[in-house]
Image (cartoon, helix red, strand yellow):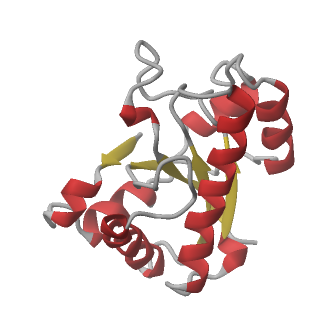
């Protein structure tokens, strides 16, 4: 249950606040308790082996989410300038009254080029970069944002693990802020 957004869509203004709010605000029941530390531990322990079939990761796949193509400089955490519009649209949606009461997990992904451990670290750093940009540049309260990297372990296109579309960021609605 989600929406996939590319930077090109955001630049073409096909994406708008309403679409983001509607996608990220879909909560059909109480969100299950998600232990971020356990997710990080499982991702580290399974680098190169995959996490998609682990029970805690399967819980995430059932939550309201947004898959976003955020472009970074090669092997870097520097967000490409053209992707700031997408980050800004996400921030606008997170400021919407319908989403202000929710907390979100920012999940960083890479494709499978490079070493699995390096990809895991890079994806975590990229998720942190998005979280930091949302909190500092766009004034999203930091207590609403959590970040994690999964490297190449949860590909969007499992048949083609080196595909560019596997390099992405996901926003997952974790439920109400407590």
Is residue 2 rendered to the left or right of residue 174?
left
Q: Residue visible at 38% across and 75% down?
A: 88
Q: Residue visible at 86% across and 37% down?
A: 41
- Above or below, comparing residue 104 to residue 43 in the picture: below
Is residue 33 rendered to the left or right of residue 63?
right
Q: Nearer the viewer, residue 177 or 81?
A: 81
Q: Could one spot residue 165 in this view of the protein? A: yes
Q: Residue visible at 39% across and 44% down?
A: 2
Counting from the top left corner in percent of width and height, residue 16 is at: 23, 68
Q: Could one spot residue 103 in this view of the protein? A: no
Q: Nearer the viewer, residue 146 or 6?
A: 6
- Report the residue that reaches farthest toward the top: 159
Is residue 39 rendered to the left or right of residue 90?
right
Q: Nearer the viewer, residue 98 or 160?
A: 160
Counting from the top left corner in percent of width and height, residue 134 is at: 54, 75
Residue 117: name its quadrant.
Answer: top right
Q: Which quarter of the rendered picture does the N terminus lie within?
A: top left
Q: How many marks?
A: 0
Counting from the top left corner in percent of width and height, residue 114 is at: 60, 28
- Above or below, comparing residue 99 to residue 115 in the picture: below
Is residue 26 rendered to the left or right of residue 125?
left
Q: Residue visible at 55% across and 47% down?
A: 75
Residue 80: name its quadrant.
Answer: bottom left
């Amino acid at each position: 249950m989600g929406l996939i957004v590319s930077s090109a869509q955001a630049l073409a203004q096909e994406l708008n606040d309403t679409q983001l709010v509607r996608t990220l605000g879909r909560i059909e029941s109480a969100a299950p308790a998600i232990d971020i530390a356990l997710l990080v531990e499982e991702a580290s322990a399974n680098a190169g082996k995959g996490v998609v079939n682990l029970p805690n990761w399967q819980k995430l796949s059932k939550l309201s989410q947004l898959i976003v193509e955020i472009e970074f400089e090669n092997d870097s955490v520097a967000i490409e300038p053209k992707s700031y519009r997408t980050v800004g649209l996400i921030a606008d949606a997170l400021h919407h009254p319908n989403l202000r009461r929710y907390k979100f997990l920012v999940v960083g992904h890479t494709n499978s080029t490079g070493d699995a451990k390096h990809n895991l670290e890079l994806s975590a750093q990229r998720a942190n970069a998005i979280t930091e940009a949302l909190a500092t540049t766009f004034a999203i309260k930091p207590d609403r944002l959590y970040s994690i990297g999964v490297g190449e372990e949860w590909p969007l296109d499992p048949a083609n693990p080196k595909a560019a579309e596997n390099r992405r960021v996901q926003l997952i609605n974790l439920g109400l802020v407590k």
